[in-house]
Amino acid sequence: MNISRGQRSLLAQFRSGVLPLRIETRRYQNEHIEDRICIFCDENAVENEMHFLLQGNFYRDLRATCYNLDNDEHYITLSDNEKLKYLVTEKVRNTAKFIEAAFMRRKESLYRTN
């Protein structure tokens, strides 16, 4: 697989459940799962792997660029769990690129200075 070291690291973190999403980071503050809301979207949804990879509107354009699956009839019919599995097993390179781009955007958003 031809992905960078950084992409490999992010993908491994995602697959092992330790990517720094609020579902993971806020457990150390004993925050209830339902309170671990994504601060990047306006959907009032828990920021977990499913939200990050498939649902969060903060990353919608990145998903379209990295995956280009809007017209894939097979993909469209899959459940969210099946889509998640498909992306991390069949579209590994695209998923690694998406995670890297999404984390760059997160960093820029968090540390933006005006």
Image (cartoon, rainbow, N blue to C red):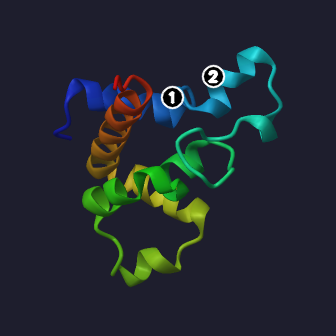
Q: Which of marks 2 and 1 is nearer the N terminus?
A: 1
- Tell me the residue at 26%/47% (across/down): 93
On screen, residue 88 above or below 2? below
Q: Nearer the viewer, mark 2 or mark 1?
A: 2
Give the residue type that dot 1 points to.
Leu
CB under 8 Å between callouts 2 and 1? Answer: no
Q: In which quarter of the image is the N terminus?
A: top left
Residue highlighted by disc 2: 25
- Tell me the residue at 34%/59% (across/down): 61
Q: Local crowd at mark 2 within 10 Å, few (<14), some, or many (≥20)?
A: some
Relative to 82, 111 lies left or right: left
In percent of width and height, residue 22 lies at: 62, 31
On screen, residue 2 above or below 88? above
Most foreground residue, 85 or 107: 107
Most foreground residue, 105 or 94: 105
Element type at marker 1? Answer: loop
In percent of width and height, residue 70 lies at: 36, 76
Most foreground residue, 35 or 27: 35
Q: Residue 19 carries which label?
A: 1
In percent of width and height, residue 14 lies at: 48, 35
Tell me the CA gap for discs 2 and 1: 9 Å
